[in-house]
Image (tube, rainbow, N blue to C red):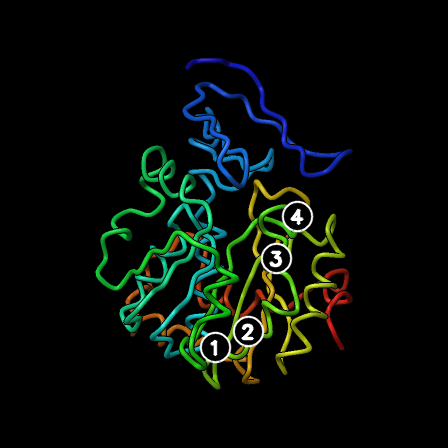
Amino acid sequence: MTTDSWINECLYPDWGQRFMVTRELARVKSDFQDIVIFESSSHGRVMVLDGVIQITERDEFVYQEMLTHVPLLAHGAAANVLIIGAGDGGVLRRVLQHNNVNRAVMVEIDGEVIRLCKEYLPGIAGDAWNDPRADVIVGDGIDYVKRAPDASFDAIIVDSTDPIGVGEVLFTDEFYSNCARILTPSGLIVNQCGVPFMQADELRETSARRKQFFPHVTAYVAAVPTYVGGFMTLGWAAKATGLTSVSVADIRARAAAAGILGTTRYWTPEIHVGSFNLPPYIGQHLPG
C-alpha cells in the first residue's frame, strides 16, 4: 500500500525521529508485539516493533557487525554460539561468516518476526536460514538458557529490544546467572544496552547485574544512525579477563583466519580495538 505518510518513533516521550513511509508492507499484531514493516525513500525497508525502530536496510550492517564480530574475534575460538532474539537473521548471518563456528543456535520468541523478515527483509539474513550449522528455534530464550547444559556455549549474543515488554526478562539476575553457567571457562556474553545519552539507567543497571556473575564487565560502542542519541552501547561480560585488550595486529590475524577480513562495511580491526575506549559520560555508568 502506497501511503507517503509519516511514522513517528515513540521510544522517548519528548524526543525522537520520523520516517516517511512510501509503502507499508506489513502490519501485524503477534502474540508478543506490534510489528510494522515499511519502505522508506531514505533507509530502504524498516522494521518497527511496538513503535520503536529496530532495523533498517541502510544501516543494519553497523549494529550487526559490531554485535557479532567483536565478541567472536575477541574470544578467538568460539565454536558454539547461542543467539537470543535477532529474528531478522542478521546476527545469524554474521556468526556463520566465521568459519571456525561449528554450531549457531538462534532462539527467537516471536515466530512472526522471523516469518515477516524472511518475506520482506530477505537480504538481512541472506542464506543463513539454510546453513546446516544453524539451529533456529522459535521459543523462549529464557527457558532455553535455563535448560541448556553447563559449559555448552563459547559465546552468547543477545539481540533484544530494550528492557521493556517482551525483552524485559532478558535483563534479569536469573538470566545472567544461567548464561554464566552455560558458558565455557573462556566464554562471554554481549547484549545491547541502549544509547546512554538518553538511557544511562539501562547501561548502569544491566552492568551491575552482570557484575554479580562475571569477573569482567564493560561495554563498547557503535555509531548506529537510526538509534538516535549518539553512541549505542553493547554490554560485555566475560569469564576471562584480557579479551578486550587484544592488539589490532592480533585481531586482524584472527579476522583473516576466520574469513571475515575485507567483508565488512563498519567493523575493522582498528574500530574493534577503539570501540572499548569509552568517553567519560559513558564509562561512568560501568562498575568500578
What secondary structure is found at the residue carrying circle 2? helix
Q: Amino acid at mark 2?
A: Asn
Residue 68: x, y in percent?
44, 62
Vertical comparison of 156 with 182: above or below: above
Q: Residue, x 45% and y 82% (percent of image)?
A: 184
Foreground residue, 105 or 236?
Answer: 105
* Amino acid carrying mark 4 in the image: Ile
Q: Earlier in the sequence, mark 2 or mark 3?
A: 3
Q: Nearer the viewer, residue 146 or 39?
A: 146
Task: Look at 29% across and 60% down and name the residue there.
Answer: 134
Q: Quadrant of the N terminus?
A: top left
* Residue drawn where x is 54% and y is 85% of the image: 240
Distance from Cα at disc 1 to Cα at disc 3: 18 Å
Residue that numbered label 2 is attached to: 178
Labelled pair 2, 4 in contact (Cβ < 8 Å): no
Task: Say which quadrant the C terminus sits in.
Answer: bottom right
- Residue identified by numbered label 1: 182
Q: Which residue is mark 4?
A: 164
**In the displayed structure, would residue 243 be above or below residue 38?**
below
